[in-house]
Amino acid sequence: MNYFVENSSLEYYLALLSLVHLPKFEHLLSTLKKLAGQTAIYGLSSILGRFLNFFLTPLHTGVLSQDDYGINTDIYSLIAFMMVILTFGMETTFFRFFQQKKTEEDGRQIFNHTVFPVLGFSLLAIVLSLLFLPQVASLLKYEDHPEYPIYLVVIVAMDAISAVPFAKLRAQNRAIRFVSVRMAQILVFVALNFFFFWLCPLLLEHDIATSFVQSIYYPELGVAYIFIANIIGSGVMLLLLLPEFKALSFSLSWSLEKRYLAYAAPLVIAGLAGIANEMVDRQFIKYLMPNDSYRAELGVYGANYKIATFMMMFIQAFRFAAEPFFFAQSKDQDKRDIYARILKVFTIFQVIIFVGLVAYIDVVKIFIDEKYWIGLPLAPILIFANLLVGINLNLNIWYKLEDKTRFGAYITFLGLFFTVVCNLALIPIYGIMGAAIATVVSYAAMTIYAYYLNQKYFKTPYETGRILLYLAISVVLAYVCFEYTREQYLLNTAIVLGYIGLLALFEKKELKQLFQNV
């Protein structure tokens, strides 16, 4: 998605990313600048998509009831689960083996053998959902709307099929094409949402083009228009990606396919556990709370989770660039030092965002309708949980580089254990607040264990004490801003600026080294 960055701002961003002191400083500076540039480019579509989705929130929460917004929250949590299954880790698998290709033919074979499993799983999912629709609708508590599961599986299948072509564009550094296709999908989706939820009701209210509007718009569909807009946007995306499928052929090697599936299988298991840590709280709310209130509670929970979108925008932008970047640096002699500095700088950015969001929480909250403000105390907890996601992203790259993807399963299953236990224990007592607490406990457990495994098997020289200090200070400041200085914006601004100044003080040696070398 998109941060609009002026040249001066980008230079400042690059400077902060290069806060390092190593013998080969110039080499490290250039690699970090490369990562920053890739983050800006590949993160464009991701950030803008999340940003525009965030700005769809006032539209959706203003128009939809808490129950209907709860349906939206539920369906998209299920979509996240199914995406892991249908993509079957083939995006990461493509990256891993594409780096090893020796010829163009090798590249085409890698593309073939990572696309076909996704096509097969997607087709199977559509067929099974149609054959067993009544049972699926009953299981998901949509007996009154059996069309919702169909929308769900179609959206997932279309997005899954696009995953490997997008990975191919990223691996080939075709950033403009990547962003163009993503942007087309996003803009179609956003435009259709405004068309169905704002323009059509407005035209009917003012009796403009009434016959035309009534022929294409049915108010009773309500939340379904979000899913319809998604399907149309994904369809446009697939049409634009058709040229990438020209390299596809039916020449397949089962031995090669088995190798890729074996590499991907632990990633799928880890991915399911990981997405469960992120999304299964919605399902616990759905099945543990009373039938007459769970949709409204899901709506409040989902709306307030949107406030954590700002943190996730930064993490998602970084992830798009970081995965291919880390693989490309895997043979560098200084790779561990590079990874350590990246985590520290990344954490600095995250804690500033965290404290800033909480300090201005009463400004941010205007993007959700006031009927959802009752859940605002969830927001700081969920933002910090997403901060831990970013730290885990950095800590966990080593096992992908070392082809030890089973460790990803170990880490995420530990998190899943805490997710399940805490949700089962806390939701019946504390409701949706229990779900938020369970989320942060799970990610904290995963972070601690991921750090332990990293130090045992990859020994990256992280500045652990300093990172923990930054995290601790950010939690204290966020608590003060939320509990004691709410809506005191001058005071909160002073707190945020003071924290930034404190971070600069802690990093003064790095800053001095930086300015001596630029």
Image (cartoon, grey):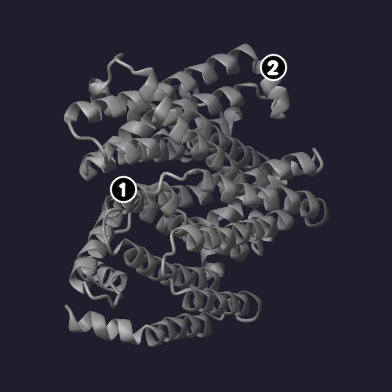
Q: Residue at x 72, y 47 (%)?
A: 420
Q: Position of residue 22 (x, y in %)?
A: 27, 75
Mark toward the start of the polypeptide (1 vs 2): 2
Q: Residues within 10 Å of mark 1 (few under 14, many from 20)?
A: many
Above or below: residue 143 compared with residue 354: above
Judging from the image, what secondary structure is the residue with disc 2 in?
Answer: helix
In the picture provided, is 267 more to the left or to the right than 73? Answer: left
For the question of whether residue 143 can be seen, the reply is no
Residue 149 found in image quarter: top right
Name which residue type carries label 2. Pro
The residue positioned 64% from the left and 51% from the top of the image is 414
Disc 2: which residue = 134
- Residue at the extreme front of the image, as rendered: 457
Q: Position of residue 232 (x, y in %)?
A: 41, 28
Q: Which residue is mark 1?
A: 324
Question: The C terminus is located in which quarter?
Answer: bottom left
* Of residues 232 and 205, the one drawn nearer to the viewer in this rendering: 232
In the drawing, does residue 140 fall left or right of residue 194? Answer: right
> Can you say whether 477 is above or below 383 in the image?
below
Q: Is residue 240 visible?
A: yes
Measure the alpha-carbon separation of dots 1 and 2. Answer: 42 Å
Residue 166 drawn at (x, y percent): 32, 36
- Horizontal and vertical percent for residue 182? 33, 39
Of residues 372 and 317, the one nearer the viewer is 317
Q: Secondary structure at mark 1?
A: helix
